[in-house]
Amino acid sequence: MLSLALVVAALVVITTGVLPGPDTAALADRVVPVLGFVVAITIVTELAAGAGLFSVLSGWLARRGGRRVWMLWLFVIVLATLSTIFLSLDTTAVLVTPVVVLLALDAGLPPIPFALATVWLANTASLLLPISNLTNLLAATKIAGLAPTGSTVDLASPFGFASIVWAPALVGIIVPVVLLTLLFRRQLRGTYRVPERASIDDRVLLIVSAVVVVVLLPLLVSGLPVWIPATGGAVVLVAAFALRRRSALGPGLIPWAPVGIAAGLFVLVEAAQVHGLGSVVGAVAGSGSSFTDLLQLAGLGVVSANGINNLPAYLVLEPAAGSPVRLIALLIGVNLGPLVTPWASLATLLWHQKVVSQGISIRWGRFMLAGLVAVLVTVPLAVLALWLSAGAP
């Protein structure tokens, strides 16, 4: 099991002193809140899904679509985008994917366009807010630390972060949607049958879940450390389920594998950085903030993400990004770029697991070719948008 192997390797690195104690403490101070948020928001979304919130939402969208396939397509795009922005890309991969695929099947439509839209947007729509992607959470504080002296904007806050990434973030949403719509234009014509209303086992749990999610969304962008409201929401839902459906609670709510993989990678990459990896990477990543410089860094992020996964790719390349605009260029590469290989992001792996469990077969050759085209179009345009909006030289 990959997560267990990485955790064991990380423990060996720490206990043997390969990663010195002060560096371990500094790393923990940075990543423990991030991992705490991942655990808390996963518990919230899993319990909300168990209460039927996402099924009810998808059914409501289907009934508002007027039986027109293009309208249902638009609704799915909006659902996947908002889920990714406000609840993270892994939430979209794990919870929105099965809802969208089931919705397409119940409506008598081919599920592949909707499934592919979900995984693409889980990655490419994850640039706007710190909570949208684990890489963003790591980058936010780093960006704030690199801000010019005297800056009045807190770049680590949700609105400060969004103020410098909004242009490439829009490209990351709009361009993939346009490409997908063109690719599946024939399947998006005509009408569909409206699925039956989802049955609700416990209306109280549904209402509590809806209230928690509605209250949580503005709190996640309020400027509070995101682990605080996410933990509060998780506690409320766990208490509600403990009273009404105790069987839904258990260790399985915690995303052990993703957290183990992330924690292990954090430690191993930090140890490599301490022992000189940064100087090697810096020679390849270049410097400067011209369009070609930013594209070079983003392109290296794309290649690294599709080669070894976007999380270690970000960690390896972060030291080579010495300014806020270069860090955003790196995020463009590791967030918008993981559309080619199946292992490029954890969200893609989780998405594939959910799709296969519903009996849908993925042809990886076509998946990778379509993803490559999307990356070759989207990433340069996003870098251009960043360069223009940042006023970089």
Image (tube, rainbow, N blue to C red):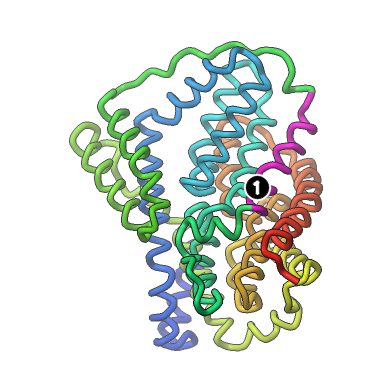
- Vertical placement of residue 96 versus 216, above or below: above
Q: Is 263 on the left-hand or right-hand side of 184?
A: left
Mark 1 is surrounded, within 10 Å at the Cα level, by few (under 14), some (14 to 19) or many (20 or more) other residues, namely some
334 relative to 120, above or below:
below
Give the residue at x 47% y 81%. Answer: 13
Q: Does the magenta segment cover residue 272?
A: no
Relative height, residue 301 to residue 247 (above, below): below
- Above or below, 361 against 268 in this view is above
Where is residue 375 drawn, in percent x and y? 76, 52
Q: Main secondary structure of the magenta part?
A: helix
Total marks drawn? 1
Question: Depth check: 310 or 328 in front?
Answer: 328
| Residue 203 in view, yes or no | yes
> Hey, which quadrant is residue 367 in on the image?
top right
Across and down, in percent, residue 336 comes to 67, 53
Q: Is residue 184 magenta?
A: yes
Q: Quadrant of the C terminus?
A: bottom right
Q: Which residue is outermost to the left?
A: 243
Q: Residue at (55%, 46%) from the top-left corner? A: 350
Q: What's drawn in magenta, residue-wise?
A: 167-185
Write down the residue under mark 1.
170
Give the x, y percent position of residue 168. Answer: 67, 54
Q: Given the image, on which type of amino acid does mark 1 rest?
A: Leu
